[in-house]
Image: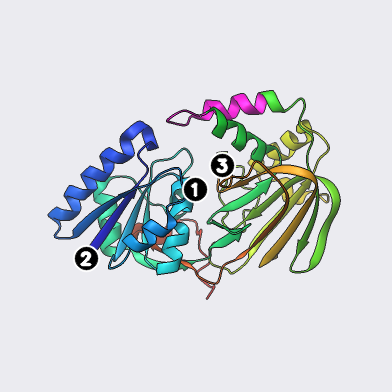
Amino acid sequence: MRVLLVFNPVSGRGAGARLADELHDAMQHQGHGVDKFQTSPDDFTAELTAGLDGIDVMCVIGGDGTVRSVAGAAAAVGTPFVHVPMGTENLLARGMRMRRSVDDVVSTVEHGHCVPIDLARCNGEPSVLMASIGLDAQIVHDVTAARGSSLSKWLYVKSMASRLMHHEPPVCTVTVDDHMVVENTPGWLIIANAPDYGWRFDPAPQARVNDGQLDVVFLPARSGWGMLAWAARCRLGMHLRSVDARSVRGRSVQVTCASPAPLQIDGDPPWGDGAVASMHMEIDANPLHVLVPPWAESCRPLVDHSAG
């Protein structure tokens, strides 16, 4: 078996690169052919796509942003991958119970079950987990601008504390599969492909990565404190009980904002974008193929096993 180890050199303050070396030795010891590919801040999709020629499995070492950065190439070629979690949240790995240890990664590569999952496109960019417009997106932009070679949760807390007093929720109009569901309303918009969210807020707990749909949740608010109240309800799993919350599903979502607003995709700002006045997100024709660990079947499903 030929394995490509794709690693983010700054993940875990260099721990990702060290883990790539350990996996390289372990895979070779098992008789596999192993190559390595280092990610960069620039768009390396074309280079990675060419490097996947003849590769049987890709191990993606890093956080959710690293997974997103390789998703376009993985979907185009159809190469299955394993997420080796080295980021702050690791939402895909959490949901699919992927583990970091060398033995567990080798076991998943050799014995994992390949599952196709939905890939979404948000303004043309790949999205595996979610996109959002609101206070969380503003915080993502703040943290990205402030981070050095590594990331800590303290940066998120610091940004939230500074933004709460003055945040003005974006005024959004949202259309799902050509049906308007929100019109010129301020609030927090989440478009989810997976149920897990940062800090376990989980605004779309019924989302599944292979149901062919996006879960759209809109929580109206007129201030940063209103957004914080919704975040608390999300953390308690109570937000969708409110008559004010809007929750629908569809394959295609069109969003316009009264004025440009920050957008985040899978926990990162989109390449080259500060704020957007419109956003389009839809399920891509090419799925991703993920190797689910042998021990994941008994866990809470991220995948809808009745779909497809």
Q: Is residue 123 magenta?
A: no
Q: Are marks 3 and 1 in contact (CB under 8 Å)?
A: yes
CA–CA distance between discs 2 and 3? 35 Å
- Horizontal and vertical percent position of residue 101: 29, 45
Report the residue at 74% width, 68% height from top: 177
Q: Residue furthest bottom?
A: 308
Q: Is residue 34 left or right of residue 256?
A: left
State the mark number for residue 91.
1
Q: In the rendered picture of this protein, how many numbered marks are placed on residues?
A: 3
Q: Secondary structure at mark 2?
A: loop
Judging by the rendered image, the residue that carries numbered circle 2 is 1
CA–CA distance between discs 3 and 1? 7 Å
Q: Are marks 2 and 3 in contact (CB under 8 Å)?
A: no
Q: Amino acid at mark 1?
A: Leu
Q: Is residue 157 magenta?
A: yes
Q: Secondary structure at mark 3?
A: helix
